[in-house]
Image (cartoon, rainbow, N blue to C red):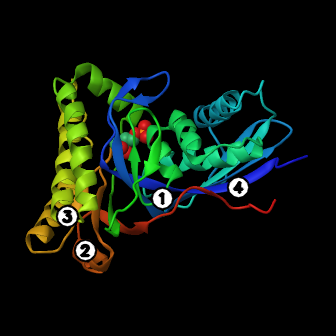
Amino acid sequence: MGRSVATARAHANIALVKYWGKRDSANNLPAAGSLSLTLEPLTTQTRVEVAERDQVVLNGAVAAAGPAARALGFLDLLAQKAGREGRPPLRVVSHNQFPTGAGLASSASGFAALTVAGAAALEIEADPKTLSEWARRGSGSAARSIFGGFVRMHREGWAEPLEGVGLELGAVVVVVDDHQKDVGSTDGMEHTRRTSPYHDAWIRQVDADLAAAEQALRDRDLQRLADITEGNTLAMHANAMAARPGLLYWRPDTLAAVDRVRELRSSGVPTFFTIDAGPHVVAFAPSEHLDRVERELRDLPGTRLIRARAGGPAERLDRTS
Ligand code: PMV
């Protein structure tokens, strides 16, 4: 028998130009492109093996029905995409190596790792672009986590690494304590698309921001990249807030962190923020400024920090098997 067991690792990514809106829910196709930075050590490691029966173990415990069905349904889809009639029973064991309780979205690293390990365990050969397209079916942002560094997701539904970027950025994630349950990205996007009067303007803005952000990266123009990234995240949240009823992902400590990052930037430290569909704030900065950024964000109320650097692509960890 061939490679019936495979282990893969993938890192999360944080978008500088965000994905918020689908044009085709059934195929999970985005309404616009997006642009992200893959980040270590926000990592998921996943083993997939042919077994007696289907089973999904997440972070050491048998997964609840919902997440288990999502992972197994995704493996059905991989087999189908590869032209197989059905698939063998599979056991999936996945660990998020995120600092515990961070409350950070793990669907990007999770589905990227599951794509690479699942395809290998099912003995499916695919190039990275195809893996990226498949990963998108699990979660839109997972298409970007197939690749390392700066990654551009296309509206057509696959991602690719951005070549020729001269900037080395890392991040300090300000994890904001939160006891609310966030509205998940799929539901949040759909609700926004249906009810926000700003949604069409947002989608148009993403196209403009993508072109400008790519140019800023190639020109190593950090100031411009900072303006685009902050403007894009505020526009995404403005759009979500304008939905009826409005989606408000921020907490008071989110705003305290945003203020602090802005103060730092006005005082000459090259840092800028973004916020996903939750309360946490990510401060990007060139690697050589991250110590300073971390020091300055350390005493923010109700928060803790995770330091991250640019991460590599999703990869097999058992190539020799
Ligand atoms: O990949 P999804 O479906 O979880 O959506 C990601 C949505 C954001 O994180 C808010 C934005 C992005 O581009 O990652």
Determine which residue is flagged by label 4. Answer: 7
Residue at the spot of label 3: 221
Q: Position of residue 196 (x, y in %)?
A: 20, 24
Residue 152 vertical placement versus 238 (above, below):
below
Name the N-terminal-most of marks 1 and 2.
Answer: 1
Q: Earlier in the sequence, mark 2 or mark 3?
A: 3
Q: Residues within 10 Å of mark 4 (few under 14, many from 20)?
A: many
Q: Are marks 4 and 1 in contact (CB under 8 Å)?
A: no
Other residues around mark 3 within 10 Å, as few (<14) / some (14–19) / many (≥20): some
Cα gap from disc 4 to disc 1, whole angstroms: 18 Å
Element carrying mark 1 = loop
236 sits to left or right of 51: left
Query: Which residue does the numbered mark 1 point to in the structure image?
Result: 148
The residue that appears at 13% across and 63% down in the rendered structure is: 262
Using residue 105 as the reference point, say whether residue 176 is left or right of it: left
Instruction: Please name the amino acid that badge 2 sits on.
Output: Val
Foreground tag (1 vs 2): 1
Q: Secondary structure at mark 2?
A: helix
Q: Picture quarter containing residue 127?
A: top right
Task: Answer with mark 2 or mark 4, whichever residue precedes in sequence.
Answer: 4
| Contact? badges 1 and 2 (CB < 8 Å) | no
Q: Residue at x 21, y 49 (%)?
A: 212
Give how far apart the Cα atoms at labels 2 and 3 are. 19 Å
**Quadrant field for ligand 1:** top left
* Three-letter residue code for mark 1: Gly
Q: Which residue is mark 2?
A: 293
Which residue occupies the extreme left position in the image? 266
The quarter of the picture where the C terminus appears is: bottom right
Pointer 3 residue Cβ closer than 8 Å to ligand 1? no
Query: Residue 231 at what x, y percent from top left?
Result: 16, 48
